[in-house]
Amino acid sequence: MNEVYSINGPVIKVKNAKGFKIMEKVFVGKQKLLGEVISISDNFTVIQVYESTTGLQRGEKVYSSGESISAVLGPGLLGNIFDGIQRPLHTIFENSGAYIKPGTNVPCLDMEKQWDVTFNVSVGEHIRFGQIFAVIQETSLIEHRLLVPKNVSGEIVMVKPNGTYNMEEVLIQVKDSNNQLHDLTMIQKWPIKEPRPISKRLPLTIPLVSGQRVIDTLFPIAKGGSAAVPGGFGTGKTMMQHQFAKWCDADIIVYIGCGERGNEMTQTLDEFSELIDPKSNKPLIERTVLIANTSNMPVAAREASIYTGVTIAEYYRDMGYHVALMADSTSRWAEALREISGRLEEMPAEEGFPAYLPSRISQFYERAGYVDTLSEKSGSVSIVGAISPQGADFSEPVTQNTKRFVRAFWALDKELAYARHYAAINWNLSYSEYINDLSKWYNKNISTEFLEARQKFITILAEENKLMEIVKLIGKDVLPDDQKLVLEIARVIRVGYLQQNAFHKDDTFVPLEKQLKMMKLILYLERISQQVLKEGKAFSLLLRTNMFEKVIKVKYEVPNDNLDLFEDYYKMIDEAFSAIK
Amino acid sequence: MNLQYIGLKEINGPLIFLDNVKGIGFEEVVEIRLDNGTVRHGRVVEINGDLVAILVFEGTRDLSLTNTVIKFKGKPMEMGLSKNVLGRVFNGIGDPIDNLGPVYVDEYKDINGEPLNPVSRLYPKNYINTGISSIDGLTTLIRGQKLPIFSGSGMPHNDLAVQIVKQAKLSGEKNEKFAIVFAAMGVTNDVANYFRRSFEEAGVLDNVVMFLNLSNDPIIERLLTPRCALTTAEYLAYKHDMHILVVMTDITAYCEALREFSSSKGEIPGRKGYPGYLYSDLASLFERAGIIKTAKGSVTQIPILTMPNDDITHPIPDLTGYITEGQIVLDRDLHQQGIYPPIGVLPSLSRLMKDGIGAGYTRDDHQALMNQIFASYARVMDARSLASVIGEDELSPADKSYIQFGKQFEKHFISQGYVNREIKDTLDLGWKLLSIFPREELDRTDEMVLEKHYNHDAAVGAFELDKKSFIKELNKEEI
Ligand SMILES: Nc1ncnc2c1ncn2[C@@H]1O[C@H](COP(=O)(O)OP(=O)(O)O)[C@@H](O)[C@H]1O
Ligand SMILES: [Mg+2]
């Protein structure tokens, strides 16, 4: 019989164990704590336990399950909040109160719930893995498309009539080539550490538009791409993730709170239930799945939370949706790996992290992509991972290794955050390698002027950077007027454009059309100013027109739904500047 | 099930090892009875076959392999609680030390707590008026928040904590009951007495529960002190609907105890020798702040930590900042200039304030004022560093206006002494200070807000700005 031999925090060992498989799900002890087999040797099988092991005794039994840790996939995921091992937190709250007790065993999805099913297959048709056999209106926003599970393909021999069914009822029956019958229900399981198969990967050519100017304009991420947001505490990682989750133009959001604050998850839940998506006029929660493994929940489950989240994301992708996944913070997951590895007395690599850290990180980000699905649709998973570097030092292993596998890097800066310049993205350290692949899309769907204006912005900011080296030594006063103008325009770009207030009703999300109009206005101001300077007028006269301040405040003064107001600004600038002349 | 074992196999630092032990639960508590009759407490920290490692909280001094009897209690560490704990003083492991006898127990609670379900939390929104401008105005404290003070040795963090406690209108509103739970970890007797006296002066001593693990008390005991304190706080908040302010000092001493435990267990050390799980361990304390839907009370935490070497990137403040909902950072430069409270406003932050300020909470212009002050004060720093290179006289008029603002802001807004300021006065003072600038410099603020609150002449009068002030100079140059 398999029994607990040793206990060290979340790591337990079973001596002379029989019958376990690597990565197998097991139940540990009287409380049936959820665990996973992580190594097997002659003498010992090592298990990491996803719940608190307090009170566990030597000699308690360990039960095999024969299967890997899996996500339960089906309708009812959207609008819900789960812990790292996909236990539904609302249900746990209703059943057992304010705290999560170890050994809590509740079904992941509401098994009683009745769903309206519409079938789109009929008897006699052939069907295989990944194809859609029926649809359910899961929320008012999202149609849930039921997919044929793995290892099922063949001829449909039974289809229920359209109607209302619960989760466990057999909906269709498929007979495979061995004449074996398969019963298909609304739910299926998928091992969380195994990527769901696709038909083929597609190039990344469409941006994931977030309405955040510094991202969409300077450092965009593609649908199906991946980005990292590193930053010290308080620099705005979580806000950035929330902004994405609220406003980005994905169909589905999977938000993973991994080893972070409980109140932030509560806030997300509250806010998303109230916030109305401007496009659909429906609460944002209807397109969102929340996974909360907060910092005070068991450490081992942090790892599971990341994989559970990405599996759910892939599942909706396979229905033909664009899914954006936020993971806040991947550092806590890496630290969980380090802690378990330490307890296994594995040989540590950099800063105590195990040698397999880079491969785990790469496997995770590799699950992003824009694909043709087995259901003959296309969909995508985009991943935005926050990183919490120790001491805000980006040279640490998690940041460095993540950098190798993501193509957009949004470096958050403490100094900018101290000055309350949010989003505190440092434009010198950040980059996006997607920009070339996306240029066609911007040119076609917005305007060719968009990327031109972007390039001018980058040039001005770079110039400012150079000039500031001088200013730091001798002050601004001695600069010639044209260079003073560069600094002033750069300030307008920084304060008026890059800086964006997440708490302002209009500024929190800005459509690309408005972004372009803002850029053009700023560049117009630059051009006119240069002309006036060329005519020999002093720079201080330009300043006195107050036009720079006016343009900085455009973001608050022109509402997103009345972009015509921009025309007034051109007039205003012309008048003010011709008055100088 | 009270199992008893005689004798030990090994003693190593604060750890003892027993062989041939059966039926013992992980993290179970034990009682260690010495042959001289004294009793110590421990906890099972590892089980390896028949071998069990136990951490002894009071230390292993005088223990030998033969002079002890170990009694396993069959349950994790618990604290006996009732409303009678109010006004009492306990040691670091929760035994009363005020000679008032044992506490009547209504309920026993596991001191480790259990993780709160995020669904059961109520997002904190009500602000606590501390009467301190740099806190109320710029890093507003919210009921149910965890907001630490990052300090350094020799700085007045204790005074600040006491001032917050005293001024926080703890007994203001009717029908609401308040109490303070104070946990001392590794601080001196003087410090503990200072807090005690201050609570007494404020007339709240009957509503204070104190847990004292002082600098000469057993170090490992410190690992339990905040847990006893927080268990008490949760009990009072969630069972008796009280609003609890928990002051814990010094988190650095707590972390050092954890490091000592970890190294004696032979664990692989992380940064600066602290264990890799320091983040999770601290989170298991700080995450116990909050409000839950099923009760009326709240637990607000003000942990105090002294940053070794004033270094905010040191693992202790660093990991704390990653867990807590902001931080109040004390600044040694301001302190040396005699400014009290020496709050460095730029690195300070309250993450929960956005939902607890503004119309209906403080005042509609609060957010705007705060954004502008942060932006302007950040530029003061730039102007100062430029001045240190080229000299103040050589600065541009605009930069001079920042130097001027910085001086007045520190003198009037940050430096406030032990005065209790109403929020309205704090906000008005803020606008008055910002009005030192020419209006165009206030580039973070809506015109409408400026219309209402900007008044340059008032600022010139109030702060006795020079006739030939920088603004005149600025205007002259432009014409
Ligand atoms: N875009 C933004 N607009 C306004 N405030 C912001 C923005 N980003 C961050 N902040 C402020 O910074 C604080 C910390 O941000 P947060 O995302 O929680 O930081 P992190 O997750 O990096 O520790 C927030 O509470 C908020 O006050
Ligand atoms: Mg965060």
Image (cartoon, coloured by chain):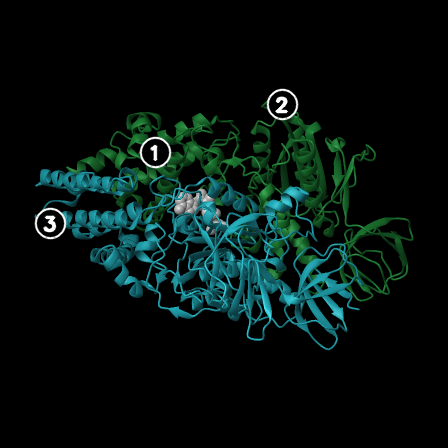
Dots 3 and 1 on the same chain: no
Residue bearing the label numbered 2: B175
Residue flagged by tag 3: what amino acid is it? Gln
Q: Colour of chain B?
A: green
Q: Quadrant of residue B397?
A: top left
Q: Which percent across, then down, holds residue A30? A: 77, 57
Q: Secondary structure at mark 2?
A: loop
Chain identity of mark 3: A
Chain identity of mark 1: B
Please tell me which residue lies in front, A122 or A61: A122
Q: Does B172 sit above or below residue A341? A: above
Q: Which percent across, then down, holds residue A428? A: 34, 59
Residue bearing the label numbered 1: B434
* Mark 1 surroundings within 10 Å by alpha-carbon count, few (fewer than 14), some (14 through 19), many (20 or more): many
- Who's cyan, chain-wise? A
Residue furthest to the top: B174
Between the residue at mark 2 and the residue at mark 1, the CA separation in whole angstroms equals 39 Å
